[in-house]
Amino acid sequence: MVTRRIALTILLCAGIAPAAGWGASVTETATLKDLQTVGSTSKKQKHQQYDLVIDTAANEYTCRSRLGSKVKPTEFVVGSTIQFAINGQNGVAVNAAKKKIRCGIVRVAGAPSVQPPAQ
């Protein structure tokens, strides 16, 4: 009886570990679909926040830049190819010139399926 419980516990832990990711980061080549401002600035908060819409092969991510981080929107051209690293709910977008934006993922949408043309 005890052996069955131990075996069951080990199986459950083995099934949960890969799903949790254990802090593993996934880096993908992606396309920057859109870059929009979020909210407004104030005397305390002088840097504008941005939402990046990033399209990967599997999903479309909306990732919000960190509060207080300085972003130059001219360095991230819409339609360009970027590297996008995902680690849990955090992301890092890196352009061709190695400029980074650290962001929090606020939305994930499945990639749209391509419909064959009607005959």
Image: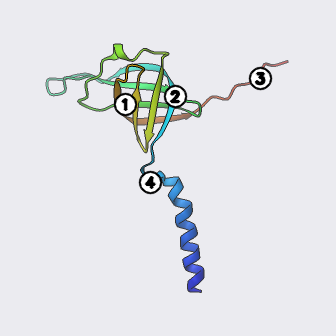
Residue most extreme to the right: 119
In this view, 54 is above or below 21: above
Residue most extreme to the bottom: 1
Residue type at mark 4 is Trp
Mark 4 vs mark 1: in front: 4
In this rendered view, identify the residue nearer to me: 64 or 6. Answer: 6
Mark 1 vs mark 2: in front: 2
In the rendering, which numbered label is found on residue 29?
A: 2
Whether the residues at callouts 2 and 3 have beta carbons within 8 Å, the answer is no
The image shows residue 51 at horizontal and vertical percentages of 39, 25
| Mark positioned earlier in the residue sequence (4 or 2) | 4
Q: What kind of element bears circle 4?
A: helix
Label 3 to label 4, Cα distance in Å?
A: 39 Å
Label 1 to label 2, Cα distance in Å?
A: 18 Å
The answer to which quarter of the image holds residue 49 is top left
The image shows residue 116 at horizontal and vertical percentages of 77, 23
Residue depicted at 46% across the width and 35% down the height: 107
Q: What residue sits right under mark 1 in the picture?
A: 64
Mark 3 vs mark 4: in front: 4
Q: What kind of element bears circle 3?
A: loop
Label 4 to label 2, Cα distance in Å?
A: 22 Å
Whether the residues at callouts 4 and 2 have beta carbons within 8 Å, the answer is no
Q: What residue sits right under mark 3 in the picture?
A: 116
Q: What residue sits right under mark 4 in the picture?
A: 22
Number of labelled discs? 4
Q: What kind of element bears circle 2?
A: strand
| Mark positioned earlier in the residue sequence (1 or 3) | 1
Residue depicted at 59% across the width and 86% down the height: 1
Q: Is 87 left, or right, of 16 in this rendering?
A: left
